[in-house]
Image (tube, rainbow, N blue to C red):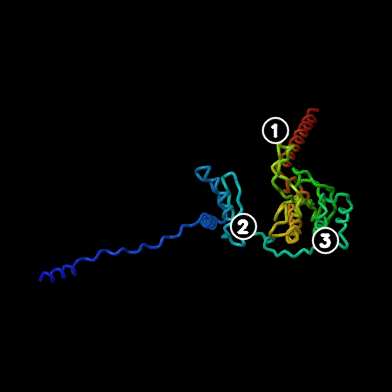
């Protein structure tokens, strides 16, 4: 009997409550995903102005991270900058020139009949300030560039700069050659990159540094490399203002980007001049039939003329 009671007690004993599995947590949105969602809801433009200035200053870093994330659609671009109300972020359509296919620009293996611009540069005793090993390649790049732009109707000419510009004016020195598109002149500089190596002090440098407190031993030695760089100035920058040899891409592969850059700068200058032509084609200094300044001047002249007529009329009646 005792055994049966124990067995019945075991059978009647309640089972421990089983734990129910909790629902899966929702994955938190990243800053980039939240930013793109806010831009979509706001129509493509938002202005960030946080309660604390430090929090607002983080948005340029967040926008840069969003551009690198690869989550922005291929047909969209993220533009950002400071404005009066805070940090403005805009999601705009990618311009057509970014999506257009770039035709290849052939570079000759050797210059059998160089372009007149190249001939003019070769005639100088120190052609564009480059070392001998890279001069031939630089002239072939210039020939390919001016020949491709000439086919599009652009005008090229040799520049006044022949030597190496000063280090602080590498981007702003006199141009080696120019290409003009729709009245916009683009100045081109061909620069030779430099390799940097640790400087080993000489005995004389060490002795001079110990003797004189103003002597400074340089940290690095610089030597000309075989890498080249093309700098473009003048007009509104679209794709870039400088192209250089790199481990991934040579300048020969980047010429298809430089040729349309000249045309884009010419188109931008043409659009900028268009309102000026409209202004000169109409009466008024601001393109409208009459601007406020002209209206006020006309009113003053009319009032003075009316007062003179009244004075004459009064003097005539007295006479």
Identify the residue at image location x=45%, y=59%.
27
Given the current orientation, which residue lies at the most extreme right position? 123
| 109 relative to 303, above or below | below
Q: Helix, strand or loop at disc 3?
A: helix
User: Which of 273/250 is in front?
Assistant: 250
**Image quarter for residue 255?**
bottom right
Question: Which of the two labelled residues, at mark 2 and mark 1, occupies the earlier sequence position?
Answer: 2
The quarter of the picture where the N terminus appears is bottom left
Marks 2 and 3, the one that precedes in the sequence: 2
Callout 3: few (<14), some (14-19), or many (20+) C-alpha neighbours within 10 Å? many
Q: Position of residue 309 (x, y in %)?
A: 78, 34
Residue 210: which numbered mark, if any? Answer: 1
Q: Quadrant of residue 267?
A: bottom right
Classify mark 1: helix, strand or loop. Answer: helix
> Is 43 or 1 nearer to us in this picture?
1
Q: Nearer the viewer, mark 2 or mark 3?
A: 3
Which mark identifies residue 147?
Answer: 3
Q: CA distance from mark 2 to mark 1?
A: 57 Å
- Around disc 1, counting alpha carbons within 10 Å, would you say few (fewer than 14), some (14 to 19), or many (20 or more)? few
Q: Give the number of the disc on residue 48.
A: none
Residue 129 image position (x, y, % from top left) = 82, 49
Q: Which residue is mark 2?
A: 77
SS type, badge 2: strand
Q: State how far apart marks 2 and 3 are (Cα).
A: 33 Å
Q: Residues within 10 Å of mark 2 (few under 14, many from 20)?
A: some
Camera-nearest label, 1 or 3: 1
């Amino acid at each position: 009997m005792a055994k049966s009671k124990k067995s019945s007690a075991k059978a009647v004993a309640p089972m421990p409550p089983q734990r129910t599995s909790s629902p899966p947590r929702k994955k938190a949105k990243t800053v980039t995903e939240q930013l793109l969602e806010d831009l979509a809801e706001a129509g493509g433009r938002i202005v960030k102005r946080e309660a604390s200035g430090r929090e607002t200053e983080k948005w340029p870093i967040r926008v840069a991270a969003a551009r690198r994330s690869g989550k922005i659609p291929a047909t969209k671009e993220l533009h950002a900058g400071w404005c009066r109300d805070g940090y403005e972020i805009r999601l705009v359509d990618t311009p057509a020139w970014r999506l257009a296919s770039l035709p290849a620009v052939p570079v000759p293996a050797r210059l059998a009949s160089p372009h007149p611009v190249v001939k003019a540069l070769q005639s100088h005793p120190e052609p564009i300030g480059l070392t001998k090993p890279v001069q031939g390649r630089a002239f072939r790049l210039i020939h390919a560039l001016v020949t491709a732009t000439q086919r599009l109707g652009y005008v090229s000419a040799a520049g006044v700069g022949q030597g190496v510009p000063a280090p602080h004016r590498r981007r702003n020195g006199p141009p080696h050659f120019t290409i003009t598109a729709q009245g916009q002149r683009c100045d081109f500089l061909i620069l030779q990159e430099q390799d940097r190596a640790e400087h080993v002090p000489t005995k004389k440098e060490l002795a001079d540094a110990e003797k004189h407190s103003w002597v400074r031993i340089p940290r690095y030695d610089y030597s000309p490399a075989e890498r080249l760089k093309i700098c473009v100035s003048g007009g509104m920058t679209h794709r870039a203002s400088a192209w250089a040899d790199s481990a991934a891409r040579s300048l020969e592969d980047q010429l298809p980007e430089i040729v349309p850059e000249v045309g884009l700068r010419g188109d931008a200058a043409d659009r900028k001049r268009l309102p000026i032509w409209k202004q000169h084609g109409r009466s008024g200094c601001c393109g409208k039939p009459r601007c406020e300044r002209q209206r006020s001047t006309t009113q003053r002249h009319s009032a003075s003329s009316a007062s003179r007529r009244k004075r004459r009329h009064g003097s005539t009646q007295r006479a």
